[in-house]
Image (tube, rainbow, N blue to C red):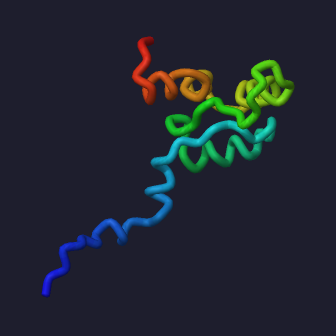
Amino acid sequence: MDSPVKYENLARPITDSLRLFYNDTAVQGNIPNLMCAYAFCGADHMLLGTDFPMAHSDLVKETIRSVNEMPIPDAEKNKIFEENARQILKLPI
């Protein structure tokens, strides 16, 4: 009897699926952690984010500083800071 479930997606490595997730930058200023996320998923799947609700917090400032100090092109930083969110939320440029 043929199964109605198709299993071809199970042959794909789990990492391919994980790279489809979007990652925030809430690592409290840890540039090596940011670079790890960048190496795994690329700037196209990173968003400026924090898990701290106070916009004027030192943690938020540290997150912004850390993204700015990542050794990546400015165009990639712009994706993290703004372009990716605009695309996901379908906001005008």
Q: How many marks are shown on the rendered structure?
A: 0
Locate residue 72: give its quadrant: top right
* Quadrant location of the C terminus in the rendered image: top left
Locate residue 91: give its quadrant: top left
Q: Is residue 4 left or right of residue 72?
A: left
Is 41 situated above or below 5?
above
Is 48 situated above or below 5?
above
At which x and y percent is residue 12? 38, 66
Q: Is residue 68 left or right of residue 84?
A: right
* Front-most of residues 54 and 16: 54
* Quadrant location of the N terminus in the rendered image: bottom left
Residue farthest toward the left in the current orientation of the protein: 1
Residue farthest toward the front in the current orientation of the protein: 53
Q: Residue at x 64, y 30 (%)?
A: 48
Q: Residue at x 80, y 41 (%)?
A: 30
At which x and y percent is residue 85? 51, 26
* Front-most of residues 72 and 18: 18
Locate residue 28: give its quadrant: top right
Q: Residue at x 61, y 24 (%)?
A: 81
